Amino acid sequence: MTSLTCFLILLSLYVTAYARINPLIHPAQSQPRTGLVSPDVVAKACEPSPNKALCVSVLKSQTIGNVNDLKQAAYVAIHVASSEAVATSEMIKATRRREEDKDVVEDGIEEETLADCAMNYISLVEILSDAASALMTGPESDVMIEVKAAMTTAETCEKSIASGRKSPMVEEVAKKNENVRKFCSNALSVYNVYAAQH
């Protein structure tokens, strides 16, 4: 056997062993899977929701675990609101960075609106994180307070937007902020169903 043949045999053994230890994932398998969702829990959790379609969609499309009881449903609803708040916060930060990179500040009122909302969203993300923690580890009575505080914080951003100029960037923040408010309202509604049964 030549040294090249030995090398190729060793290489093929290594590749085979590596493939068994670290298999390739098919692209379809890498998509997040939804957890198992109890239709009865979803129906009960979403019954009093002001936006039932959103509520059902949130609970059925979640990817963080199974929804077999109302506590899990409340956690999923808070988690989705939190994820949307984080995405909105990141979008605001990116928008502000783009504006800061410009040589000329075009609109001081727009920058002030974005700065106000950026500060609001730093608090809002933390508040929703606290709500999720309170639901899982207690005290659960803090959950309602935290989610209501998150809604109030989003409303503060909305007031700042309403008092400023409506540039395309500010309009985009307004849309994302409205989504966060809807998800927070949904989280509060689902939590209230859980709290009433608990």
Image: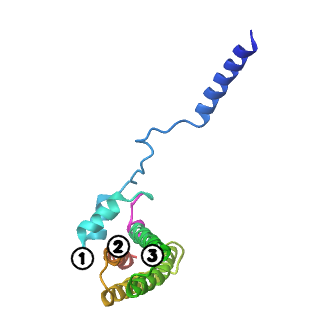
SS type, badge 1:
loop
Residue at mark 1: 50
Q: Position of residue 151 (x, y in %)?
A: 37, 83
On the rendered structure, is 192 left or right of 128?
left
Seen at 24% across and 69% down, the residue is: 52
Q: Nearer the viewer, residue 191 or 187?
A: 187
Q: In the rendered image, which quarter is residue 158 located in?
A: bottom left
Seen at 33% across and 75% down, the residue is: 193
- Mark 3 in CB contact with mark 1 (< 8 angstroms): no
Residue at mark 2: 176
Amino acid type of the residue that numbered disc 1 sits on in the rendered structure? Pro
Q: In the rendered image, which quarter is residue 70 located in?
A: bottom left
The CA span between labels 3 and 2 is 19 Å
Q: Which residue is the extreme one toward the top?
A: 1
Q: Position of residue 6 (x, y in %)?
A: 72, 16
SS type, badge 3:
helix
Seen at 36% across and 76% down, the residue is: 184
Crowding near pointer 1: few (<14 within 10 Å), some, many (20+)?
few
Amino acid type of the residue that numbered disc 2 sits on in the rendered structure? Lys
For the magenta stretch, what is the residue range? 66-73
SS type, badge 2:
helix
Which numbered disc flags the more N-terminal residue, 2 or 1? 1
Residue at mark 3: 99
- Answer whether residue 23 is visible to the viewer in this image: yes
The answer to if 150 sits in the magenta stretch is no
